[in-house]
Amino acid sequence: MAIQIPRGTQDILPGEVEKWNYIENTAKKICENYQYREIRTPIFEYTELFQKGVGDTTDIVQKEMYTFRDRGDRSLTLRPEGTAPVVRSFIEHKMFGNAVQPVKLYYNGPMFRYERPQAGRFRQFVQFGVEALGSEDPAIDAEVISMAMEIYQQLGLKNLKLVINSLGDKESRMKHREALISHFKPHIGEFCTDCQNRLEKNPLRILDCKKDHDHPLMKTAPSILDYLNEHSKAYFDQVLDYLNALGIAYEVDSTLVRGLDYYYHTCFEIMSNAEGFGAITTLCGGGRYNGLVQEMGGPETPGIGFALSIERLLAALAAEGIELPVARSLDCYVVAIGDETKTAAFKLLHALRSEGFSADKDYMGRKVKAQFKAADRVQAKFVAVIGEDELKENKVNVRNMATGEQKELPIDGFISEFKKMANMGEE
Ligand code: HAM
């Protein structure tokens, strides 16, 4: 049997790839307007980066990483997410010393997680993400959230739900942690082994357990919002005030904890409400990670960001029946009639392309009628025909496929005449 694509991955074929480019370009444009700059980090990093950065107790690190040893016996991991690599790069390139602060970055690239593949869940998927490092202004939190919303809205999505929570600062989290341990400890035997392990290491993660989701103790678990100290509460309120000011609707959900360990204060997810979207409705996740830069060996630096996957975005667009404006067209198809005209036609084609027109010709030895059909199939705006008579007279016959108008243009100086004809067609 022929070799097949690995499970949880996909080929993005012509016809589909235009949508990806359209989405990525839209998101990039929005980021550039917000003054974020692109960063590209390697696809693999030392495994330790994610153990430290994402957190030892997370599902990602415990179960989902593609880790391997290279020929030098170093443990490397295909990146499961983009925040830890960006933070590593921020420290390594001393961006904390940049003249422009905060440091606002965006990235777009494949991530790898060994998860059970299903609709909206892949083993290789593409994340578009942003990270803003160096500011603890609640306006940056609102800025990052509004960017994510703008990406979706500019692409036409309507059925969106923003869910937001605060995990508080260190002090608030410690108090909440103790409360969670006291709450779960007497009954921890009724929970899965993962949760039993999490109890002392990271009890917050119990709230995110898929297996024990329906255990009655989950519903009565202490809410982080009741444990926020004054600073954390004021911070959260300011973020919400900014969102209100921008008219961004949200729902506060104190059970939103996210699957990564580095969050403090604001965390959020954007879901699709579209009917028929399927079980996995989270399109985008993000939050604030004050403390992460320091933990990774850099100076104390606050940070916040989000990541969304293009795969889920496409699924949301499909669920809402939104077609992206990605129709392809061809400026000119060159038809050669007779063997003697082939070289002249090929030169004409080259001249068109050199001037920035999209142009093509037949390479399949088709007869003239079939060449016209081929031009139709690729939606050529113009067809330029060179026959033996035309060649002798130094002429090309150009047909506007939309209007049927035909003109004879000189082979010498063809481009300038073609431009005139093409421009008239545009008006
Ligand atoms: P995350 O919630 O793990 O956060 O992933 C963010 C988004 O990536 C998800 O909301 C989802 O759209 C997409 N995603 C995750 N796993 C898959 C998968 N297996 N297949 C398809 N899409 C997937 C992070 O990765 C954080 N680094 C986000 C962040 C940036 N926080 C602060 N800055």
Image (cartoon, grey):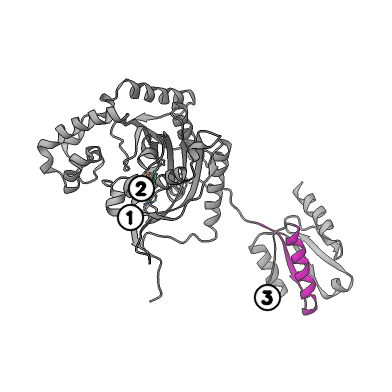
The residue segment tinted magenta is 329-355
**Distance of label 3 from label 1 (alpha carbons):** 51 Å
Q: Please state the horizontal and vertical placement of residue 203, each as a whole percent of the image.
A: 21, 38
Q: Which residue is mark 1?
A: 65
Say above or below: 141 vs 284: above
Disc nearer the start of the sequence (3/2)? 2
- The residue depicted at 53 percent of the width and 37 percent of the height is 98
In what element is the residue under mark 1?
loop
Quadrant of residue 112 in the image? Answer: bottom left
**Distance of label 3 from label 2 (alpha carbons):** 46 Å
Q: Please state which amino acid type lies under the numbered disc 1.
A: Met
Q: Nearer the viewer, mark 3 or mark 1?
A: 1
Asked whether disc 1 touches disc 2, contact meaning CB atoms under 8 Å apart, the reply is no
Q: Please state which amino acid type lies under the numbered disc 3.
A: Arg
> What label sits on residue 366 in the rendered view?
3
Which of the image's four quarters has the N terminus?
bottom left
Q: Which residue is mark 2?
A: 278
Residue 330 covered by magenta stretch:
yes
The answer to whether any part of residue 270 appears in the image is no
- The residue depicted at 15 percent of the width and 44 percent of the height is 191
Residue 65 covered by magenta stretch:
no
Q: Please state which amino acid type lies under the numbered disc 2.
A: Gly
Q: How many marks do you count on the picture? A: 3
Work out whether residue 190 or residue 272 is closer to the camera in this orientation and state it.
190
Q: Label 2: how many residues lie within 10 Å, few (<14), some (14-19) or many (20+)?
A: some
In what element is the residue under mark 2?
loop
Disc nearer the start of the sequence (3/1)? 1
